[in-house]
Structure formats: structure tokens, C-alpha cells
Amino acid sequence: MNRAHYETLNIPEDASDADIRQAYKRAAKEAHPDREGGDADRMSKINQAYNVLGHAGKRAHYDSTGEEQTLDSLEIAARKGLYGLINQALGSTDENANFVETVLTHLELNRQKFAAEEALYKNRIKNVAAHKRRLKRKKKGANVLLGVFEEKQRINKAKLANATFTLKCIERGIEMMQDYETVFEEAAAMQRLQSPFLVLGVDMAFRS
């Protein structure tokens, strides 16, 4: 997996946001072209690394795929998820229901679900890193347990990347749906008022 941006800033893959900012400032100060011994090409790489690692969504995508996330990839995934949710809604929504509000409600439920999932894996990564840091072998020799911790971190980071990217897609889907509204005809509006507890069951369509 590509880890060039971490190497550029000379930081580990589990570096915190604060660590990334500090590493960027330090590296930029050393490589700035206006400084004696500075290097414009290296400065460009440092800026690019920070542009990716300093942004939660881009970093998650980079950690998961080894590639930089483009706006198109996020937009395409967001539309695909939204279209899937809308298609499900079209097959089960009562004609008198507020279609836009219904879809937005389920988008918000999905947003909360993946926000919680994102927080869960961030916490797990933090916990594993703490245990790994404290684990010391009593006698000299290779730490054979280190591989267990590293594999667990790899799994946690992959799941975090998926949750973060999915969350970004859902948030983009919400933005798109907020551009629309359901306009009721007078007769339909009256019937809707008489049936205020219409419920739509829509499965989550955004999981990648």
C-alpha cells in the first residue's frame, strides 16, 4: 500500500491530527524555497502530503486505498448511494407521504449510524496504539506480539476509512436532497393531514 505521504512528513500511520500539523510546519520550514538550502520540489511534495493527511476524509480514503481521493470519486459514490436509497423509497412510499422529508430522515439516520461507527474505530485505534506503546518484552529479543497489534490496527484503519468515506457520501447526499422539496396538491395535502403517521422502511443504501 502506498504510504509516501507519511514518509514525506516523517510520521507514523497512526499520527494524530496535531502530530501531522507539527510535522508539516517543521518540514515546510526546512524545505521552504526562500530558506537557504530549501527545495521547491520537496516543498511541493510536503504541501501535497499535508493536503491529503490534514483532511480527515482524504486521509481515510488514502489509508484505505493508497490513492488520493478526487472530488469526482466522492461525488460519484454519493450519487450512487443516494440513487439507491431513492429507488428503494420509490418502491415503498405512500403517494401522500412527503417523499423528500422521508428520504432526508433516513439519510440522517444513516449519518448518525456512520458517525458513531467512525468514532468507534477512532477510539479502537487509539486504544491499540496505547497498548502497543506500553508493551515491553522483559528479556532482549524480538517482540513477537507486535505483529498482532499491527494487524489489528490495519483492520481498524480499514474499517475507519470505510466509515469516514461513507459518512462523507451521506453528508453529500443530504446536501443534494436539500435542494428539493415535495409540493402537495390541495387534495393530497388534506389527505396527508388525516394520515400523519405514514412510515417508510428504507434499507441503508450507502454502505460500500
Image (spheres, grey):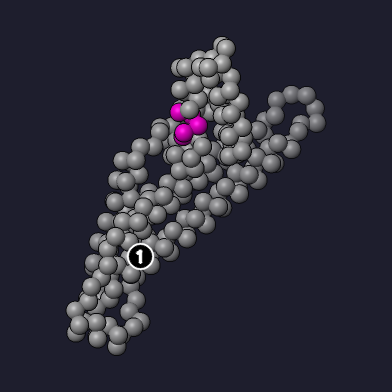
Residue at the spot 44% in from the left edge and 39% down from the top edge? 58
As drawn, the residue found furthest toward the bottom would be 194
Residue at the spot 40% in from the left edge and 32% down from the top edge? 67
Residue at the spot 56% in from the left edge and 53% down from the top edge? 120
51 in magenta: yes
The quarter of the displayed image where residue 68 is located: top left
As drawn, the residue found furthest toward the top would be 37
The quarter of the displayed image where residue 111 is located: bottom left
Q: Position of residue 167 (x, y in %)?
A: 43, 52
Q: Position of residue 188 (x, y in %)?
A: 21, 82
Magenta-tinted stretch: 48-52
Q: Position of residue 105 (x, y in %)?
A: 38, 67
In this rendered view, identify the residue nearer to me: 54 or 151.
54
The quarter of the displayed image where residue 76 is located: top left
In this rendered view, identify the residue nearer to me: 12 or 145.
12
Residue that mark 1 sits on: 104
27 sits left or right of 140 in the view: left
Tell me, yes or no, if residue 21 can be seen here. Answer: yes
Q: Position of residue 89 (x, y in %)?
A: 28, 66
Residue at the spot 48% in from the left edge and 27% down from the top edge? 47
Mark 1 is surrounded, within 10 Å at the Cα level, by few (under 14), some (14 to 19) or many (20 or more) other residues, namely some
Q: Main secondary structure of the magenta part?
A: helix
118 versus 8 height, above or below: below
203 in magenta: no
60 sits left or right of 203 in the view: right
37 versus 162 height, above or below: above
Disc 1 residue type (three-letter): Leu
Tell me, yes or no, if residue 206 can be seen here. Answer: no
